[in-house]
Amino acid sequence: MLGKTFVAAAIAALLVFAPGETRADQVGDAVAALGASVTDVRLVGEWHTDGRDGVYRVLFVGDPETGGTSRLFVQWLTTDGNTPVVERSIEIPELGQLGIVVYDFAYEVDDEGLALFIESFDPAKELELGYELYLKAPDDYIFQPISN
């Protein structure tokens, strides 16, 4: 495992820019491109698949068409030389269909993949709810209410 060194290198790679362009403009443009509906973005740990390495990026987005209820996206980031690359990006549609607002989450990463523990509020029922996501691969995951 590459550990914290790889995560630091991945973050640094996200700040590498093309020659001739000013860093401040690119950073500002990248932040502006995120949009106001992005409510949380985090790098949450490393992935290793078929000899490739990278980090997971988790994004929660408030859907303005549903009053700001949350949608969940997971991305697999890597680098191609000094260029950051989104290798894969998926949505977990089951979360978006619930009509909930996510206000926090915790995570764990191990050899099996990524686990998210999601804290949310259901505005229609006025209830706090918890969900868990176990993600082994882009097409292999379990999303369910947190079990006690």
Image (cartoon, helix red, strand yellow):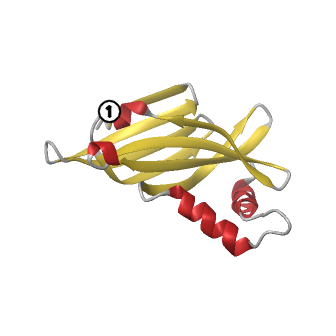
Q: Secondary structure at mark 1?
A: loop
Q: Position of residue 46 (x, y in %)?
A: 65, 47
At x 41% / y 32%, what residue is drawn?
93
**The C terminus sits in image quarter:** top left
Identify the residue at the far left of this view: 125
Residue at image coords 83%, 56%: 82
Question: Which percent across, then down, holds residue 107?
Answer: 48, 49
* Horizontal side of residue 6 vs 63, given as left or right: right
Closer to the camera in the image, 145 or 71:
71
Query: In the image, what residue occupies the spot 33% across and 48% down?
Result: 64
Q: Position of residue 36 (x, y in %)?
A: 43, 59
Q: Residues within 10 Å of mark 1 (few under 14, many from 20)?
A: few
Res. 94 image quadrant: top left
**Is 37 on the left-hand or right-hand side of 88?**
left
For the residue marked with disc 1, what is the amino acid? Gln
Residue 135 percent coordinates (x, y): 52, 34
Residue at the limit of the structure toward the top, as seen here: 139
- The count of marks equals 1
Q: Is residue 42 above or below residue 112?
A: below
Location of residue 23 with respect to 71 vertically, above or below: below
Q: Which residue has dot 1 on it? A: 97
Identify which residue, 73 or 128, lies in the foreground.
73
Q: Which image quarter: residue 22?
A: bottom right
Q: Residue at x 54, y 63 (%)?
A: 32
Above or below: residue 106 compared with residue 112 = below
